[in-house]
Image (cartoon, grey):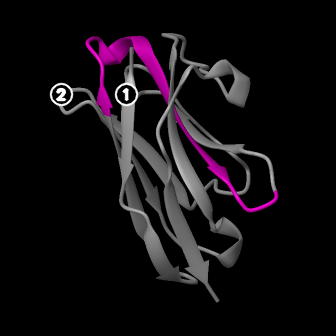
Amino acid sequence: QVQLVESGGGLVQAGGSLSLSCAASVRFFSNYYMGWFRQAPGKEREFVAGVSWNGKSTRYADSVKGRFTISRDSAKKTVDLQMTSLEPEDTAVYYCAAVFNRSLMGAVRVAEYAYWGQGTQVTGSS
């Protein structure tokens, strides 16, 4: 069983930065590919970024590439999402997710992930 708790959401002006963190309660954190997703009102949940079990392979949605950075700390069992140049279009509830997967390619589809956090709100104001 994996429990995920996100933190760090909030309100930020356009062009600003914000960091999210996800703490995982799991015995073998390195067995899991970790992802960040987001869901805006009226829209489907979408992949934002993912990081492999060893932290050496990352994937990003085209909409955030170059602005967001995902990283993981195996000792702390955390996954962070550093967001810069935030836009009003980035406004959404952001979710941390985990899937039992040690491949470097990981997963980008919602259905592939077995464990989810409760979400944290990020609001980018214009």
Which residue appears at 48% of the width and 80% of the height?
12
Give SS at disc 1: strand
Q: Are marks 2 and 1 in contact (CB under 8 Å)?
A: no
Q: Is residue 103 above or below residue 120?
A: above
Kindly identify the residue that appears in the image at 79 percent across and 47 percent down: 44
Query: Looking at numbered disc 1 in the image, what kind of residue is underneath it?
Result: Gln
Find residue 76 and report its horizontal and vertical position in percent.
19, 33
Q: Residue furthest bottom?
A: 126
Label count reads 2
For the point 42% across and 27% down, the residue is 56
Write down the residue under mark 1: 3
What is the magenta range? 24-42
Residue on which the image places disc 2: 75
Q: Front-most of 30 and 57?
A: 30
Residue 113 is left or right of residue 43, and the answer is: left
Kind of element beneath mark 2: loop
Q: Is residue 16 visible?
A: no
Amino acid type, mark 2: Ala
Q: Residues within 10 Å of mark 1 (few under 14, many from 20)?
A: some
- First reached walking from the N terminus: tag 2 or tag 1: 1
